[in-house]
Image: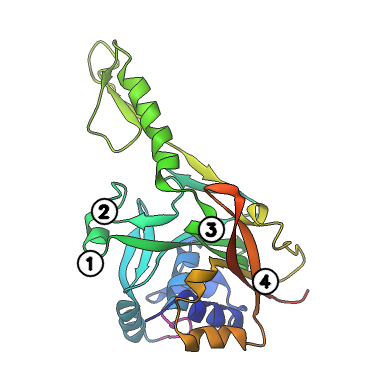
């Protein structure tokens, strides 16, 4: 079963890969977001350099129970493993646009923002979630952060409480015809006298780049040709097979450190975590 530790080794050993060389079938990717997503997919499936499309598809089928669409999180789910959300940024410190989906410590099967195919891809209720944030410039991947949601985001109710308060406030405005059936924040029917105009009210969630959030753990090197940074709770790290942990701890290119991070639900509480890094010298 594939996991993030295996992926980190493959990334460190193949950092020269440009996003422009990633293909979908016989066609190179023109959209850099899709190119980054396929790069992450192929890394986890150990198919980064597989030129045979049939074999590559078989590896992806063996690795993932779900690969998503552009409108619903997550982007992919490892069979029996973690969910992955991929975000492409165009500068190393750009904040992440999460759109209508609030930050997630975990991915829950009953989340209304995920689609049916994701819910039934396997038997599951909760998945750990990896945010994979790639800085891509001129079709080249310059940095990649892979951060687990429970290091990065607060518990679900932190965000849903805000959404529900907004919905409740809007529903109390007497002269508006509120659409109660939307999965968005709200909607207003029959805005004009003809009753032909509808107003969608959508959330736009934004979260700070992990390079800012965790600058007390790792300082980004603006001159490095490539750098890889992964962060997970220590208990998560020890949930992986011994062989995969040994491959990280003995790898000549990867550096692993014990660190303390602020609890997303209570910053005065510190959590034990593992920081795994790899940097190409400038």
Q: Which residue is mark 2?
A: 115
The answer to whether residue 115 is above or below residue 220 is above
- Badge nearest the viewer, 3 or 4: 3
Question: Disc number at residue 226?
Answer: 4
Which one is in front, 120 or 90?
Answer: 120
| Label 4 – label 1 distance at C-alpha | 37 Å
Q: Are marks 3 and 4 in contact (CB under 8 Å)?
A: no
Q: CA distance from mark 3 to mark 4?
A: 23 Å
Q: CA distance from mark 2 to mark 4?
A: 35 Å
| Mark 1 vs 3, N-terminal side | 1
Q: Is residue 115 left or right of residue 47?
A: left
Classify the position of the C terminus by image quarter: bottom right
Q: Residues within 10 Å of mark 3 (few under 14, many from 20)?
A: many
The span picked out in magenta is 45-51
Describe residue 199's horizontal placement relative to residue 129 as left or right: left
Q: Secondary structure at mark 2?
A: loop
SS of the residue at dot 3? helix
The answer to whether residue 173 is above or below residue 143 is above
Please tell me whether residue 242 is drawn above or below residue 274 in the rendered image: below
Q: Earlier in the sequence, mark 3 or mark 4?
A: 3
Q: CA distance from mark 1 to mark 2?
A: 15 Å
Q: CB atoms at circles 1 and 3 under 8 Å apart?
A: no
Q: Which mark is residue 206?
A: none
Q: Earlier in the sequence, mark 2 or mark 4?
A: 2
* Disc assigned to residue 151: 3
Q: Is residue 280 visible?
A: yes
- Residue under the point 39% across and 77% down: 26
Q: Residue at x 35, y 50 (%)?
A: 71
């Amino acid at each position: 079963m594939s996991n993030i530790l295996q992926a980190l080794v493959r990334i460190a050993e193949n950092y020269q890969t440009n996003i422009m060389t990633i293909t979908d079938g016989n066609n190179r990717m023109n959209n850099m977001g899709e190119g980054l997503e396929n790069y992450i997919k192929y890394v986890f499936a150990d198919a980064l350099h597989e030129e045979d499309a049939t074999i590559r598809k078989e590896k992806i089928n063996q690795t993932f129970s779900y690969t998503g669409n552009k409108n619903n999180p997550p982007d992919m789910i490892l069979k029996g493993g973690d969910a992955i959300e991929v975000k492409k940024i165009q500068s190393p410190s750009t904040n992440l646009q999460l759109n209508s989906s609030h930050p997630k410590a975990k991915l829950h099967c009953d989340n209304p923002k995920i689609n049916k195919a994701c819910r039934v891809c396997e038997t599951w209720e909760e998945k750990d979630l990896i945010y994979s944030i790639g800085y891509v410039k001129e079709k080249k991947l310059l940095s990649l952060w892979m951060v687990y949601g429970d290091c990065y985001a607060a518990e679900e109710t932190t965000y849903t409480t805000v959404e529900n308060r907004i919905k409740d406030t809007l529903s109390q405005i007497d002269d508006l015809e509120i659409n109660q059936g939307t999965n968005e924040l709200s909607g207003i029917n029959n805005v004009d006298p003809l009753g032909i105009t509808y107003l969608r009210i959508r959330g736009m969630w934004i979260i700070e780049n992990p390079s800012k959030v965790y600058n007390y753990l790792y300082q980004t090197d603006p001159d490095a040709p490539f750098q890889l940074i992964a962060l997970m709770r220590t208990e998560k790290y020890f949930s992986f097979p011994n062989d995969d942990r040994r491959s990280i701890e003995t790898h000549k290119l990867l550096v692993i450190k014990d660190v303390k991070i602020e609890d997303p639900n209570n910053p005065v509480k510190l959590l034990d975590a593992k920081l795994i890094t790899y940097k190409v010298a400038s």
